[in-house]
Every structure is written in C-alpha cells, then in structure tokens.
Image (cartoon, helix red, strand yellow):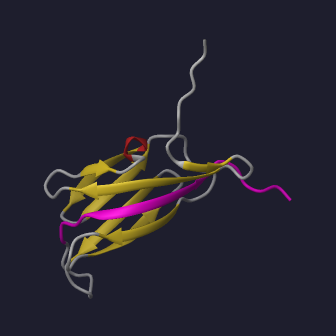
Amino acid sequence: MTTKTIERAVHSVQRGVIIYNVKKTGGGTPALGGADSLQFSVTDNGVGDYSLSLLDEASEESLVVYLQSKTAGVICKLGTVSSSSIQVECFSDLAETTPAEGDFDALVVKRKRSDKF
C-alpha cells in the first residue's frame, strides 16, 4: 500500500501554481497558523521585522505575496521577496519610521515551473 502526502494548499497541475495561506500571530515569540503554516518557518529579526521561509522546494520565480495587517493601527509591508523567503516589516505610523509588533495574514503564490511557449 502506498500513501500520498495531502497538500492543503490550492494548486494547479498544468501551471504548477500553489497558493499558501499563512497567518502570523504573537508579539515576543511569533507563531504561524493557517491552513499551510507547516510549509513555512518564521524568524523574528527584531521589532516588527519578520522573515517567512518556505520549507518546501523553492519557487522557479520570486514568490508572489498578498499581505494584510491584522493589528489595528499597524501597517505591514513586504520587504525582500525571493524564491524561498519573504521579509515582512510592520510599522505603527504611515511614515514607516517606527517599527511595531504586528499580526498579519499572507497568501503566497509559488510556481513550480514556468510556462514554456
């Protein structure tokens, strides 16, 4: 009998697109939740600076990310994005000068292969 790993992420076999749902919570020690939280690890790089690293194989291209702050009065924005990691920076002001702890939701799109035309 063979077993298959069930991917909770949404994916397309034709284009190799996978969409992950990840939620970051927690102030001092960040934690990940959401349907695909086991596909990522989180690192706290300092106040309001987080890195999410993809534990699965890297994307063929840079990851595409939709990000939404879940903490009132805190703005979260993308920093550096690569084929296997995402930096998220959170601030308590519109000028983005005061780092702040924040929770956020992220939808991450990964492509396993490029279209070949």
Which residue is at 42% across, 58% downward? Answer: 86
Which residue is at 48% across, 53% downward? Answer: 20
Residue sitting farthest toward the front: 1
Residue sitting farthest toward the right: 117
> From the viewer's perspective, is residue 103 above or below residue 30?
below
- In the image, the segment drawn in magenta is 100-117
Left or right for 88, reference 101? right
Residue sitting farthest toward the top: 1
Residue 61 in percent (x, y) is at: 61, 57
Residue 57 in percent (x, y) is at: 54, 41
Quadrant (top left, top right, bottom left, bottom right) of the C terminus? bottom right
Of residues 76 and 87, the one drawn nearer to the viewer in this rendering: 76
Residue 4 in percent (x, y) is at: 57, 26
Of residues 31 and 82, the one drawn nearer to the viewer in this rendering: 31
Left or right for 66, reference 69? right
Quadrant (top left, top right, bottom left, bottom right) of the N terminus? top right
Which residue is at 18% across, 66% downward? Answer: 101
Of residues 55 and 105, the one drawn nearer to the viewer in this rendering: 105
- Which quadrant holds residue 51? bottom left
Residue 23 in percent (x, y) is at: 33, 56
Query: Is 54 contained in the magenta span?
Result: no
